[in-house]
Amino acid sequence: MKKLNSRVALALLALLASLSCVARTQTAEQAFGFERGGNFGEAAEAWRAVTQRNPQDAGAFAHLGLTLAKVQKYEEAESSYRKALALNPRLPGVELDLGLAEFKQNNFHAAAPDFKAALAADPSSSQARILLGMSYYGDKKYALAIEALEPISKADPSNMELHEILVESCLWAKNDSCALREYRLIVQQNPNSVQSHILMGEALDHSGKTQEAIAEFETAEKIYPNEPRVHFGLGYLHWKSREYDEAKREFESELSVNSGNALALTYLGDIALKSDHADTALSLLGRATKMNQDIRMAYLDLGAIYLRKERYKDAESAFHRVVALDPSQSDAHYQLGRVYQILGNTTAADQEFKLVQELYQKSDDKVAKSMSRRMQ
């Protein structure tokens, strides 16, 4: 009798194990079914159930990440992809998917290593190469962006968007020969396009030929008056030339076709400040910083306004933000030192003024080294 009971128990355990396997298989099949049918929300829940039953299933975590990304839950997708790679670092395609999840959250710095790994795994992947280049571009690593994107641009000379990104990367990297080469390719494709005139204007401005640049942007404006980049570029060139009335008109035109342009608001605020309309400037700059908290000039101007209005704590906060955005510039350190002096914090003021002297010294050293090389 005991033997019979033990046999029944073993059979029951085997049956339960079998049923458990069937349930897992059915859940995975159901998840695949949802995924194939485009029901990604339901697919994600089904894949989540699979990972809960088998937390060592790297493929299930990869599919969970993919379906979460499809419903734009990128942070959760990123976590799932990382679990998949931790379980199986050689799982194909996951590094590219992880990079995409980070890229779509504007985490360009984090995305680049994943795209680099994906490209190493498949050197022929143009998608991985383009995304790597765009991540470097978003992370303001323009020399690396050029290195990644140039092979693609040579293989596809008709891709104007890619060539435009390359021109901008070349200009920001101060690689004039690269910028000129890309510009020529664009002009060869369509010499009378708006993009050609815009890029020519940018190249001329980069070479110090501001008035010629203005003429190029004015030509572009005649071709396509509702193109946002044209108005902003023309406004910037007039602002740079201290033609503030013309600049104001262009920045206002920019905002009429692109109301979310925080830089246009910033320049309008700066023009208002230069015209002694502090309250107008304060309103414009406040709107700009609500849209974008990374515009250095906006906070520098806000600090100056607060200083005039004797709102010293607000000025201190604004100048701190300027320093955080670029600690290598002496102007914000000097203004912050002034604020500390007024507030009676002489120790902090002396530290800021010392930094100003050190930055000036570094600047002088760079000039001296440059002159020395030229004379050799």
Image (cartoon, rainbow, N blue to C red):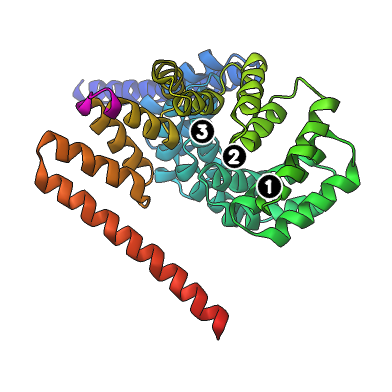
State the separation of the CA atoms marked 2 and 1.
10 Å
- Classify the position of the N terminus by image quarter: top left
**Badge 3 is on which residue?**
101
Residue 147: give x, y in percent of width and height. Answer: 64, 58
**Cβ atoms at labels 3 and 2 below 8 Å apart:** no
Q: Position of residue 300 (x, y in %)?
A: 38, 35
Q: Give the residue type that dot 2 points to.
A: Lys
Q: Return the residue nearer the eye: 277 or 334.
A: 277
Badge 1: residue crowd in 10 Å (few <14, some 14–19, many ≥20): some
User: Pointer 1: what residue?
Assistant: 205
Q: Residue at x 85, y 43 (%)?
A: 158
Label 2 environment density (alpha carbons within 10 Å; few <14, some 14–19, many ≥20): few
Residue 229 placement: quadrant:
top right
Give the quarter of the image for residue 361: bottom left
> Which marked residue is nearer to the observer: mark 3 or mark 2?
2
Q: Is residue 182 visible?
A: yes
Label 3 to label 2: alpha-carbon separation: 39 Å
**Marker count (numbered):** 3
Q: Do we see residue 57 in this rendering?
A: no
Image: 176 above or below 132: below
- Contact? badges 2 and 1 (CB < 8 Å): yes
Specify few, some or many for label 3: CA neighbours under 10 Å numbering under 14, 14-19, or 20 or more. Answer: many
Question: Please, what secondary structure does the residue beneath circle 1 have?
Answer: helix
N-terminal label among 2 and 1: 1
- Tag of residue 240: 2
Tag 1–tag 3 contact (CB < 8 Å): no
- Closer to the observer: label 2 or label 1? 2
